[in-house]
């Protein structure tokens, strides 16, 4: 995710030498990061490698309406 975010933030959407052209290299890199992340998520889910225990207290702390 950090590679995807930094690629998006650092690189311009348009080509630096011609602002009328799209910077395809940026979008190619972003696609690569998204594809590999999705593939890794699916492989972990399919192999049941990471079966995290439910932690309702932690979930409530993060997603609950009353944080304090």
Image (cartoon, helix red, strand yellow):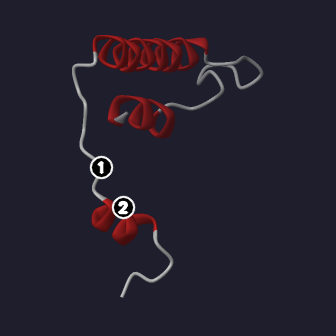
Answer with left or right where residue 16 lies relative to residue 67: right
User: Which residue reaches farthest bottom?
Assistant: 68
Answer with left or right where residue 26 lies relative to residue 14: left
* Vertical order, 55 against 40 (above or below): below
Q: CA distance from mark 2 to mark 1?
A: 8 Å
Q: For the C terminus, which image quadrant?
A: bottom left
**Which percent across, then down, holds residue 11?**
50, 31
Q: For the N terminus, which image quadrant?
A: top left
Per the image, the residue denoted by label 2 is 59
- Point 39% across, 68% down: residue: 60
**Which percent across, then down, holds residue 52?**
24, 38
**Which quarter of the picture shows residue 42?**
top left
Nearer the N terminus, badge 2 or badge 1?
1
Please tell me whether mark 2 sits on a helix, a strand or a loop.
Answer: helix
For discs 2 and 1, the disc positioned in front in the rendered view: 1
* Vertical order, 1 against 39 (above or below): below
User: Which residue reaches farthest right?
Assistant: 20
**Which quarter of the picture shows residue 55?**
bottom left
**Which percent across, then down, holds residue 25?**
53, 13
Q: Nearer the viewer, residue 35 or 52?
A: 52
- Mark 1, Cα crowd under 10 Å, few <14 / some 14-19 / many 20+, is few
Answer with left or right where residue 53 lies relative to residue 56: left
- Point 28% across, 18% down: residue: 48
**Which percent across, then down, holds residue 6?**
39, 36
Q: Nearer the viewer, residue 59 or 22?
A: 59
- Mark 2, Cα crowd under 10 Å, few <14 / some 14-19 / many 20+, is few
Q: Nearer the viewer, residue 54 or 40?
A: 54
- Point 24% across, 44% down: residue: 53
Q: Tell me whether circle 2 and circle 1 mark residues in contact (CB < 8 Å).
A: yes
- Point 45% across, 18% down: residue: 38
Per the image, the residue denoted by label 1 is 54
* Vertical order, 47 against 3 (above or below): above
């Amino acid at each position: 995710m950090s590679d995807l975010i930094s690629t998006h933030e650092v690189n311009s959407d348009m080509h630096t030498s011609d602002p009328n052209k799209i910077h395809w290299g940026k979008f190619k890199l972003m696609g690569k990061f998204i594809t590999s992340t999705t593939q890794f998520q699916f492989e972990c889910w399919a192999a049941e490698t990471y079966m995290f225990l439910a932690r309702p207290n932690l979930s409530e702390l993060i997603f609950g309406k009353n944080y304090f």
